[in-house]
Image (cartoon, helix red, strand yellow):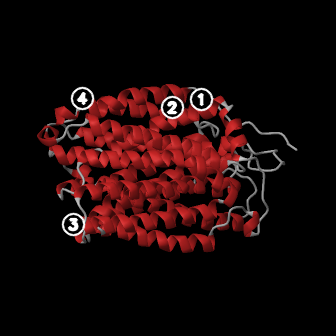
Amino acid sequence: MPAWLSQLLPILLLLAAIAVVTRRLPTIELGHSAEFRRRRFFNWFPLGLTYAFLYMGRYNLSANASALDAMRLVSKQEFGNIDGWGSAVYGVAFLLNGPLADRWGGRVTIALAAGGSALMNALMGAAVRLAQGGQLGHDATITALTALFAGNMYFQSFGAVSIVKVNAPWFHVRERGMLGGVFGILISLGLYFAYDWSRAIARLLPMPWVFHVPALLLLAFVVLDLLVIRDTPGQAGFQDFDTADASSGDTGERLGPVEVARRMSSQKVIWIIVAIEFCSGFLRNAVMKWYLIFADKTGLEGFVSTHWGVLLCIAGILGGVFAGFISDHVFDSRRGPVASVLYAGLLLGAIVVLFTLSLPVAGWTVVLMSLCVIGVHGMLSGTASMDFGGRKNAGIATGIIDGFVYLGTAAQSFLYAVLLPSGDAASSPARWTPWPLAMLPVAAVGLALSTRLWNARPARRGATG
């Protein structure tokens, strides 16, 4: 069996098993016709695949950070700073991109995300090619990659707001838990593409192709998305319906972004969600972006690091489906209890890693932590943002929540660039203690905040003039 098939087969089998299980779950009957469900699938599926390939074009730099370091193009500290600035740009881009998604619709903004990221990835590949050829000095290379990665992250920030903006009018609140699970699955597939496909590309082709391949894939999806995706059921020839979210009963004009932000900021639950998602961004990328570097520097490479993309994908799929299932079928479509359960897992995982850094169990523990954090992210950024923002304001709501995820990402990038060992010291697992130690208080805060959402539900808005 070819190596690529042996890695892909477990994911395909897992997806098939999940499909069988979810089809046998008790259905939430809302009167949708088979034709509507079919058209809805062909709306969210290409949208979701676009998001997965956006992840490939986002995490390809992280996946190959050790290889770029070995080539003396980008050191560990330089990668941390490049990633930190890019994440910071993503975190504040919602101020512009959320309102644009609400104004232009998710169909247009997902095309902008894919097209802009394709351009930035193509240029990053060109910068690496010039650096390898000696035509671009080291400082100029770092400056170029920092600017281009920041540009990439600006366009990437359209992705999540577009997904939520398109899906909000197509899914009732009671259907969105499993949709959050699907969101987690798509993230997981994107991580597989980024960490395993891009590392395979780096082994088979020159390093610039790590950036050129996702650029080509994203360009293809720009065309597909514009042809297939529609922003609402009404635009696809179906009847629009009440989704029972925060826009339910609101028959007035769409509000401006400042007024939407003001109304959202007046809700205590939104502040709690963004604080939790700041913690999620810190923890998600503390695990995903630094484990491979830790394994490479300490010589603790093994099954987990070799199959990092596959394991992240499987963990994320299980986390997304588990979170979606217990939200809709155990906790009556509440998101807070799910986040609490998963954050308890994150806190426990950080404790285990702290005491097992030199053992193989640390690698398997961070895989389980990825399961938990992808599940939380799907529930809050992918689902709660629709619930509490409503279909009218889903873009701004998701932008605010997802923006804090990447502010958390930026915080861990800058922090770890300073705290983590370099040079010969990096070869000792004991010197990596700051890695899990910094996760502990963040996981504890996230758990405490998640319990505050235990009974939170979106309030319907009355008609406005």
Q: Quadrant of residue 371?
A: top left
Q: CA distance from mark 1 to mark 4?
A: 31 Å
Question: Would you name the residue on which mark 4 appears?
Answer: 355
Which part of the image, by quadrant, shows the N terminus?
bottom left
Residue 153 visible in the picture: yes
At 24% across and 70% down in the image, what residue appears? Answer: 206
Q: Name which of mark 3 and mark 4 comes first in the sequence.
A: 3
- Viewer-nearest of labels 3 and 4? 3
Q: Are marks 1 and 4 in contact (CB under 8 Å)?
A: no
Question: Would you name the residue on which mark 2 appears?
Answer: 340
Amino acid type indicated by mark 3: Gln
Question: Would you name the residue on which mark 3 appears?
Answer: 132
Q: Position of residue 16 (x, y in %)?
A: 46, 61
Q: Camera-side residue: 331 or 419?
A: 419
Amino acid type indicated by mark 2: Ser
Question: Would you name the residue on which mark 1 appears?
Answer: 454
Q: Name which of mark 1 and mark 3 comes first in the sequence.
A: 3
Q: Camera-side residue: 59 or 350?
A: 59
Q: Name which of mark 2 and mark 4 comes first in the sequence.
A: 2
Q: Position of residue 432 (x, y in %)?
A: 22, 35
At 76% across and 56% down in the image, what residue appears? Answer: 31
Mark 3, other Cα within 10 Å: few <14 / some 14–19 / many ≥20 = some
Residue 207 visible in the picture: no
- Viewer-nearest of labels 1 and 3? 3
Q: Are marks 1 and 2 in contact (CB under 8 Å)?
A: yes
Q: Name which of mark 1 and mark 2 comes first in the sequence.
A: 2
Mark 2, other Cα within 10 Å: few <14 / some 14–19 / many ≥20 = many
Q: CA distance from mark 2 to mark 4?
A: 23 Å
Label 4 sits on a secondary structure element that is: helix
